[in-house]
Amino acid sequence: MTAHHSFHKAPERVVDLEAARRRHGAQADRMLTLLTAGDPLADAVIAELDLYGTQARRALDAGLRNGLASLDEQPPTAVAALLKQLETTPSWVDPLMLHRGDVVSLSVPPIWFGLCAITGALSHAYGSPTTARLLARTGRPTDMAARRLSEAAVWARQTIRPAALLRGRPGYVATVEVRLHHARMRVTSLTDWDMGAPGLPIGQLDMARSWLGFTFIAFQALAAVGIDIGPDDERYLYQYWSYVAHLLGLDESLHRDVADHVGARRLQDLLDATTPALDENSTALTAALVDAQAHALAGVPGADLSEAQLRHLIHSVLRRVFGEEWGDRLGIPSVPAETCLMHLISQLNREARYWQTYSPASAGEARRRRALEGFRPQPEAAALPGGASCRRHAGAHLSGVSAA
């Protein structure tokens, strides 16, 4: 199949092309060329899987787990080309980094990684009407929400673990499967999709939006609850996820210049300039996502916040990340000040993370510095939705909202 489709005359998907050109110059026009760009290697593999069936699938599975050179028989052309691309490690990749894994994401407590990173990433993906429209056609949002949350969480955890992206490891295989799933979605949607203004569904720009969801958006959401990272961590994060982008088939022009949050925000601005107004599909998917996440977290053993409190917390985080205007567009309700836990949780998380940066050998110096600053942290207080400290303070801040 053709991976790069003809570009249509008027880029109606672009909100304000001239404003984008004034702000971003030639990069804005580069984004236009990607409106209908797919992933040639993955798209061709899907065609071969459909043509050759089990034979091609077996060759692909064996190649992913054991490498192209391990195959006894020559695989189909596209399968071989994809495996060769995957096994050609870019020169900018640090092998030691791959062995360490995404140490920045791994430093985030799992409950916060799920509430902020996974929910933020999926909400950001749903901010693309082309993605939201395609997903809405596959079933009712409320029926899909829990499954998509689970799938995204499993994939992310597989991806960030030490050595996860080495050839044949679970994160490597899972990431390529995500890439092929995107290609499959493109194929199945093109038969009756209007290839005009919205552009190619799940194409390069939508994939870039998803990639930013697990990097920039995820850590903006974490910062909103007091889990901040420094410049060195930012650089490591984007270096690691650039290799994830390579495995996902994302065009290098979209991710190689993104080395920190500043660069990510520039890419975010460019994507926003090529995103049309959100519709009811985006709002329905986001609402279902928030409900599913709040329900799941309320069921975690030891959780002391109710489902309603968790929903309010997620709404607060998302509105802080996306801003008031985009929050309104996504249908994320404002949270009354008397039911908002953001200030309390941010303070607790910052205190906990401050102490976690010190080794036992420097703990005494840490206490001395904090005392001089007039700050008395409590390292034993777990700044989690189910933590005792959070539960203690929640009663004072959530009048009328019962705890689970």
Image (cartoon, rainbow, N blue to C red):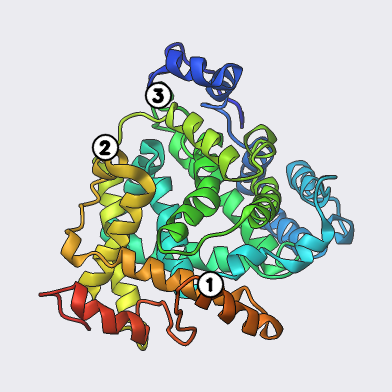
The residue indicated by pointer 3 is 13
Circle 1 packing at 10 Å, graded few (<14), some (14-19), many (20+), is: some
**Residue at position x 57%, y 40% in the image:** 262
As rendered, which of 30 and 36 lies closer to the eye? 30
Disc nearer the start of the sequence (2/1): 2
| Numbered badge on residue 117 | none
Q: Which amino acid type is shown beneath numbered disc 3?
A: Arg
Q: Is residue 392 left or right of residue 257?
A: left
Q: What x and y, as percent, mark residue 270?
A: 50, 29
Q: Is residue 300 left or right of residue 108?
A: left
Q: Which corner quadrant of the image does residue 132 belong to?
A: top left
Q: What x and y, as percent, mark residue 63?
A: 78, 59
Q: Is residue 352 left or right of residue 95?
A: left
* Label 2 secondary element: loop
Disc nearer the start of the sequence (3/1): 3
- Counting the numbered discs, the total is 3
Say whether residue 173 is visible. yes
Q: Nearer the viewer, mark 2 or mark 1?
A: 1
The residue indicated by pointer 1 is 353
Say whether residue 167 is visible. no
Contact check, label 3 and label 2, Cβ < 8 Å: no
Q: Is residue 151 above or below residue 391?
A: above
Q: Which corner quadrant of the image does residue 326 belong to?
A: top left
Q: In the current view of this chain or complex, which residue is farthest to the front? A: 372
Q: Which amino acid type is shown beneath numbered disc 1?
A: Arg
The residue indicated by pointer 2 is 279
**Residue at position x 44%, y 27% in the image:** 274
Q: In the current view of this chain or complex, which residue is farthest to the left? A: 400
* Label 1 secondary element: helix
